[in-house]
Amino acid sequence: MPETRQFEKPGGATPRGGGWLPHGFHLGTHSHPDGQLVYAAAGALATTTERGTWVAPASRVTWTPPGFEHSHRFYGRTDARLVVIPADECGDLVAHPSVFAVSPLLREVLLALTGPSGRSPESEKRLRAVVADELGETPEQSLHLPEPHDDRLRVVTDLLRADPGRSTTLAELGRAAGASERTLSRLFHTDLGMSFHRWRTILRIHHAVVHLTGGQSVTDTAVACGWSNPSTFIEAFTAVVGQTPGRYQAGLHDHGG
């Protein structure tokens, strides 16, 4: 694929196509009249909406339905692929932003839809139908980090985001937020739908994906992201991402990253 960006935005519509983006490239908050799938054929990306942040390594694709405000940040040198799903074809897809696993078939269809133009509109529509079928058969993945609404909880999550590797306890964070450990523990469940430990683990996995995509070793990534030893990190990463960090990193090279 050429080095230049090849994204199309016909008549101000939803961007589509493919192109290489540099590490750290950021697309600010915006929305589209159509649905959009964003796939990193190499590299990784994070999609953020008011509901939280979804991270997608090369084995995942992010989905944003029509009308949702969102932003993207890309990690590593990223082969970004944007697929538009017209609003009238979104009925079979989930009505909220999400991340899905990419099967071998889905990957090939996403690449075909974002490759050199020349397909007829009818051919593209048939390929989009295959995408919808594949996503309908694929369970949503767990790399979602929800955003808090409670001000006390936001203080805690902001502190954790500032230093994901910090080993501060919930009680210590509570003192900074002006709330007890018990109150914060309850808020994590009621506001975010997960425990403090789970939220911090997902946050650390997000950062681990970035470190691994940037070429850091598994051991260095484990330490930087707050794990006391590599084996514990490998276990947590595998449980969330579905493959070991070493296999994930090797896949980046297989996909041309």
Image (cartoon, rainbow, N blue to C red):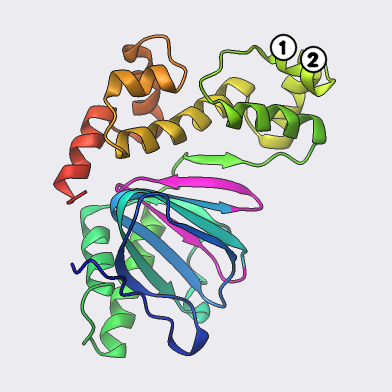
The residue where tag 2 is placed is 175
The label on residue 172 is: 1
Q: Which mark is residue 26?
A: none
Mark 1: few/some/many CA within 10 Å (<14, 14-19, 20+): some
Across and down, in percent, residue 29 comes to: 60, 62
Q: Is residue 236 left or right of residue 248?
A: right
Tell me which residue sits at (21%, 32%) in the image. 247
Q: Quarter of the image holding residue 184?
A: top right
Residue 55 against residue 83 in the figure, above or below:
above
Distance between the alpha carbons at the discs numbered 1 and 2:
5 Å
Residue extent of the magenta highlight: 49-67
Q: Amino acid at mark 2?
A: Arg
The quadrant in which residue 232 appears is top left
Judge from the rendering whether residue 167 lies leftward or rightward of residue 256; answer left or right.
right
Q: Position of residue 231 (x, y in %)?
A: 32, 13
Few, some or many residues within 10 Å of mark 2 (<14, 14–19, 20+): few
Residue 99 on the magenta segment: no
